[in-house]
Image (cartoon, rainbow, N blue to C red):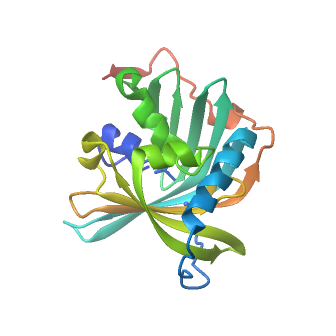
């Protein structure tokens, strides 16, 4: 959301954020060595930020490197995350290389291809908590939840696009998550609880990098551009 439409949708969901979650942002400097107590402070800042977080909207660039073919696929578009009661909803519009829509709400992931007029729906009810932990990874998630789900290595501070971020390497504690993700690295602004960059590494040797910019924090989100609009000719499959 913590997405490529060329890989199975369960891997899409797992990598959101992959990702989450982040556009042509280049680290301005090597990460500074962490000081004692730095990680605890970052997690406390994220806890506080999670209480303030209501929404985030950003432009994104998703790069997927596939080891077998030694090729990188790039997608760009816009994405939003929004708190809705105790849950988080998400919508994304991919604009390049082709238009696609993705959303997560009501314990379901929907993927719509307007070119083929086809809608895929995947029920996430059994894995809702796991999926939301990916969706909120650097987008409103608390430090306590991060530490509960991931073994965290503090890699110090790093400045990205003029913003001081904490660079954290995350290894999933859940064996089921490890089948899709060996580890993640996130560059998170702990003051806002927002990731500016995420790298997601898969057991296959493939990896995804997501970079986010032009981030609108706690502003009203116009969800209309993200709406999935189907018609009587739309084909549909469910998983």
Q: Is residue 209 above or below residue 79?
A: below
Q: Is residue 79 above or below residue 35?
A: above
Q: Residue at x 59, y 44 (%)?
A: 142
- Apparent side of residue 5 relative to residue 135 in the rendered image (left or right): left
Q: Residue furthest bottom?
A: 29
Q: Is residue 30 above or below residue 147?
A: below
Q: Residue furthest top?
A: 232
Asked if one can make out residue 116 in the rendered structure from this viewpoint, the answer is no
Of the 4 image quadrants, the one containing the C terminus is top left
User: Relative to the observer, which residue lies in front, 111 or 37?
Assistant: 37
Report x, y in % for residue 61.
54, 61
Q: Residue at x 44, y 44 (%)?
A: 148
User: How many numbered callouts?
Assistant: 0
Q: Residue furthest right?
A: 219
Question: Residue 118 falls in which quadrant of the image?
Answer: top left
Q: Residue at x 34, y 59 (%)?
A: 183
Report x, y in % for residue 204.
20, 59
Question: Residue 70 falls in which quadrant of the image?
Answer: bottom left
Q: Is residue 227 above or below residue 81?
A: above
Asked if one can make out residue 134 in the rendered structure from this viewpoint, the answer is yes
Report x, y in % for residue 112.
46, 33
């Amino acid at each position: 959301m913590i997405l490529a439409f060329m890989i199975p949708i369960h891997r899409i969901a797992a990598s959101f954020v992959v990702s989450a979650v982040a556009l042509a942002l280049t680290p301005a400097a090597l990460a500074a060595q962490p000081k004692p107590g730095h990680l605890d402070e970052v997690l406390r800042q994220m806890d506080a930020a999670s209480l303030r977080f209501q929404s985030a909207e950003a432009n994104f660039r998703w790069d997927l490197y596939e080891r077998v073919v030694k090729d990188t696929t790039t997608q760009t578009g816009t994405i939003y995350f929004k708190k809705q009661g105790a849950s988080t909803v998400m919508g994304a519009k991919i604009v390049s290389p082709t238009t696609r829509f993705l959303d997560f709400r009501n314990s379901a992931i929907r993927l719509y291809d307007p070119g083929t007029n086809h809608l895929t729906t995947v029920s996430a009810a059994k894995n809702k908590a796991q999926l939301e932990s990916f969706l909120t990874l650097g987008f409103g998630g608390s430090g306590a939840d991060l530490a509960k789900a991931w073994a965290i290595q503090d890699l110090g501070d790093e400045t990205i696009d003029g913003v001081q971020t904490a660079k954290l390497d995350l290894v999933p504690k859940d064996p089921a998550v490890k089948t899709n993700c060996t580890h993640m690295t996130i560059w998170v602004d702990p003051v806002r609880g927002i990731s500016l960059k995420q790298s997601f590494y898969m057991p296959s040797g493939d990896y995804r990098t997501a970079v986010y910019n032009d981030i609108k924090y706690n502003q009203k989100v116009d969800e209309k551009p993200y709406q999935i609009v189907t018609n009587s000719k739309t084909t549909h499959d469910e998983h």
